[in-house]
Structure formats: structure tokens, C-alpha cells
Amino acid sequence: MTRRGEMLDDAWYMDYAAGTLKSEGEDVLMAAHVELSDEARGRVEELEKIGAALLMMAPENEPLPFTADDLLAAEGALAPLEVGDVTRHEAYVPQALGDFLQRIHKTIRWEFLGPGLNKAMLWTGPDGEKLWLLKAQPGVAIPQHGHNGSELTLVLKGSFWDGEQQFCPGDVEYADEAAAHDIRIDDGGECICLALTRGKLRYDNPILKLFQVFTGL
């Protein structure tokens, strides 16, 4: 399936608030999403308040799946953002991503992906999960593809269309093995996205399958 629109299922925001996301890659992408999207930030704050109320009401012998420490950690994650080392990066880089790149001593290095397309690999998890940047030029149509795993795509700059749905800065799209993308970049300007993928992309075109060997995606 493809989750169309700027928001994800509530479970993502609850796990982010509780500090129970599955991987470091998910932590970084969700932190950047909450940083860039007022609606996402408001949803996390709402879920945090609900969690705090449930914690107060829960009987002592029925522990909740999160603790007071989890809520305090979430409160810290939602504190007002300060200008830090992210200023060393391009303006499109959210602070959450900039801080992560500094911590792992990684710089953004763009590589050719296709006509009008570049990628920058940032991080690979222990299970092959990949966090990477995609830069696409105005008007480019990305070859139709599916997935052999899940994909989260967060727009950092510009916008793109997947079918009839537009995604703008701060919006995030979720796709799994059942999804088929028909993506085109807005004509108004360059689009840069942060993607987190599990498993390789799936192409029906044999030429694209061959090219995939060189892209690593």
C-alpha cells in the first residue's frame, strides 16, 4: 500500500514520542519530519499528552508499554530547536539530519543516479536498511517502480507528484511491497527528499534492472 498525504499512521508518532522506533534510520527520518511539519509536531504533542494522562490513570499492577522516562525523553525531543551545526550544511538539511551526519562523521556526496537524478547515501543499518537523499530536477519523471520492502520518503525541498497526490516539504509518504509509484517532479524547481528503504526497488523494465546493479538501490 501507499500512504498518500503528508501524515503517517498514528503508530509512527506514538513510537517516536515513546522512543520505541525500530532503527536509528527511523529515528532520524521521523525527527526530521516532526521538525519540518507543524501537523506532525502537533500530533506527537497530542499523543504525548494522552500518554501522560493514561500513565496517571493506570493501576499499579497494570504497567503501560511506556514509562515516565519515555515521556520525558519525548518532551526533550520536542523542545524548541536551536541553531547548531546544521548551519554547516545546505539550507534544505533539517537540524535532526544535520546533527546525525555530524555524529557519524558523514558528508553529503552526490552521485549520478540517472538523467536529472542524483543520490547521496548516508547510512546503512545492520539489516540492510538504507538512509539516503534523492535530488531530482524539475519536470523529471522517475521510472515506475515497486518495492521489495518498505520505503519512507520525506520531502525536504521542492515537491513531487505520485499519481494525483502532491507531496511538499515536511510531507512524508509510506510505501510497502504492494505499492507502485508513478512519480514526477514539479516543474517549479529542484526536489530533494530523504528516503529510508528496506529492500531494493523493483523494476519490470529489464534495462532498469541491469542499471540497478550499479546504483545499489
Image (tube, grey):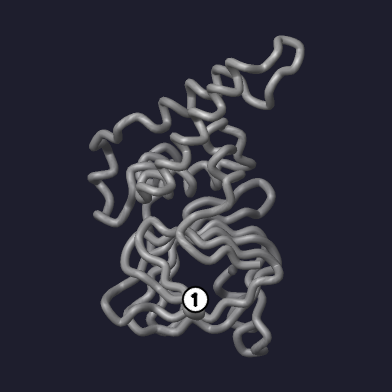
* Quarter of the view holding residue 108: bottom left
Which quadrant of the rendered structure holds the N terminus?
A: bottom right
Residue 79, percent from left and from top = 35, 29
Which residue is most to the right?
A: 61
Foreground residue among 186 and 95: 186
For residue 55, side relative to residue 163 (left or right) = right
Q: Which residue does the image show at 46% across and 42% down from the upper left? A: 43
* Rendered view: 33 above or below 156: above
In the picture, measured across the screen, residue 72 lies left or right of residue 110, that is right
Give whichever of 123, 23 is nearer the camera: 23
Residue under numbered circle 1: 162
- Please state if 209 lies on the left or on the right of 90 as rendered: right
**Which residue shows up at 48% across the image and 49% down it?**
29
Q: Is residue 181 visible?
A: yes
For residue 45, above or below residue 175: above
Three-letter amino acid code at the position of disc 1: Asp
Up the image or down, 13 lies above or below 70; here it is below
At 49% from the left and 76% from the top, the residue drawn is 162
Q: Residue at x 71, y 10 (%)?
A: 60
Image quadrant in which you'd find residue 150: bottom right
